[in-house]
Image (cartoon, rainbow, N blue to C red):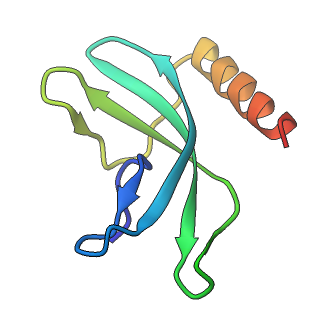
Amino acid sequence: MKPKRPDHQLRRGTGVLVVKELDKEVLSKGAWTTILYRYQDLDRATGEFGPDKYSSAATRSRKASSSPNPINISSAAQAEKIIETLSRWLNKK
């Protein structure tokens, strides 16, 4: 099962890390907080983490629930923040 948010995720019963969060950036706050994640999934065949992946999630502050749907970019400011964050992450390699 694919996690909805790429926090550090452990495989149930084994304690094996299967999703490694590398970074995250809060893009916007309000009734829903939008977060951009940079993470890696464990390749179960090799036991090594794969290439960097990116995901966004909206979390409602009151209930701490994640949105299962893709996040739409809601403004030019949010788009610029996504570009800035991804550019910074990609230039660190």
Q: Residue at x 30, y 75 (%)?
A: 14
Residue 47 horizontal side relative to residue 33, left or right? right
Question: Which part of the image, by quadrant, shows the N terminus?
Answer: bottom left
Q: Position of residue 88 (x, y in %)?
A: 78, 28
Q: Is residue 20 above or below residue 41?
A: above
Q: Which residue lies most toward the bottom here?
A: 45
Q: Residue at x 52, y 82 (%)?
A: 44
Tally of numbered tags: 0
Q: Is residue 31 above or below residue 53?
A: above
Residue 77 picture quarter: top right
Question: Which part of the image, by quadrant, shows the C terminus?
Answer: top right
Q: Nearer the viewer, residue 21 or 74?
A: 21
Q: Nearer the viewer, residue 93 or 85?
A: 93
Q: Position of residue 9 (x, y in %)?
A: 37, 57
Residue 61 horizontal side relative to residue 77, left or right? left
Q: Residue at x 69, y 27 (%)?
A: 85
Q: Position of residue 78 (x, y in %)?
A: 58, 18
Q: Which residue lies most toward the left here?
A: 63
Residue 2 horizontal side relative to residue 65, left or right? right
Residue 81 picture quarter: top right
Q: Is residue 2 above or below residue 31?
A: below
Q: Is residue 73 above or below residue 49?
A: above
Q: Which residue lies most toward the front here?
A: 15
Q: Position of residue 64 (x, y in %)?
A: 20, 31
Q: Residue at x 35, y 62 (%)?
A: 10
